Amino acid sequence: MKRFALLFCLFVTGCATLIRGTKETFTVDSVPQAASVQLSTGQTGQTPFSVKVPRGANLIVTVSKLGYRTQQITVPAQVSPTGAFLAAANLFGSRDQSGVLGATVDTADGAAMEHKPNPLLVTLEKE
C-alpha cells in the first residue's frame, strides 16, 4: 500500500500528508511509573501513556506524582528525515507548479514533522 502511495505522490500534491498523516503516536513513560501526564493539547493519562498528537505542534508535557517533583518538558516538533524526503518528492515528482503546493501543504499541516524525543522518558526526583 505504501509503495502505491509513494508512486501516487509523484503525480499529486501532499506526499507526506498522504503517507504519514498529520498525527503521530506520542509516548510518555516515567520512573517511577503510574505518574500523571498532561499534554498542552489537553490530553491526560498515566504513564506509560500513548496518544495521537498533531505532528506539527510543539508539546508541553507535565509529569507529576505524589511525593515527587513535578516536571514540565517542552518537546519540539522537528522536520523528520522521512517527512523532508516526502515533501521534496513533491517538487521533483511534479510536472508543473503543483509540486510547490504539495511541499507547502506537507510543511503547513505538519506531515513533514515529528516530535523528538519520542518516546519521552521522564525520571522524577523525590521531594
Image (spheres, rainbow, N blue to C red):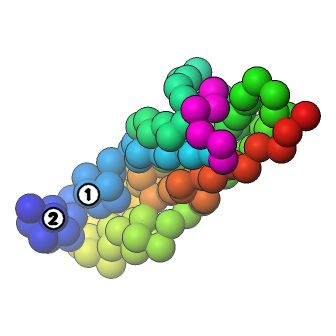
How far from the left and from the top, in percent, is residue 70?
81, 32
User: Which residue bears the numbered disc 2?
Assistant: 2
Quadrant of image for the N terminus: bottom left
Q: Secondary structure at mark 1?
A: helix
Asked if the stretch drawn in magenta spans residue 97, the answer is no
**Mark carried by residue 19:** 1
Q: Going by the picture, which residue comes out furthest to the right?
A: 127
Q: Nearer the viewer, residue 127 or 27?
A: 127
How far from the left and from the top, in percent, is residue 107?
49, 54
How far from the left and from the top, in percent, is residue 105?
41, 50
Is 62 situated above or below 1?
A: above
Q: Going by the picture, which residue comes out furthest to the bottom?
A: 92
Are discs 1 and 2 less than 8 Å apart at CB?
Answer: yes
Q: Nearer the viewer, residue 13 or 58?
A: 58
User: Does the image show residue 109?
Assistant: no
User: Does the image show residue 72?
Assistant: yes
Asked if the stretch drawn in magenta spans residue 34, the answer is yes
How far from the left and from the top, in percent, is residue 42?
58, 21
Badge 1 local density, few (<14 within 10 Å), some, or many (20+)? some
Q: Amino acid at mark 2?
A: Lys
Q: Earlier in the sequence, mark 1 or mark 2?
A: 2
Quadrant of image for the C terminus: top right
Q: What residue is rendered at 85% in x and 34% in y?
A: 69
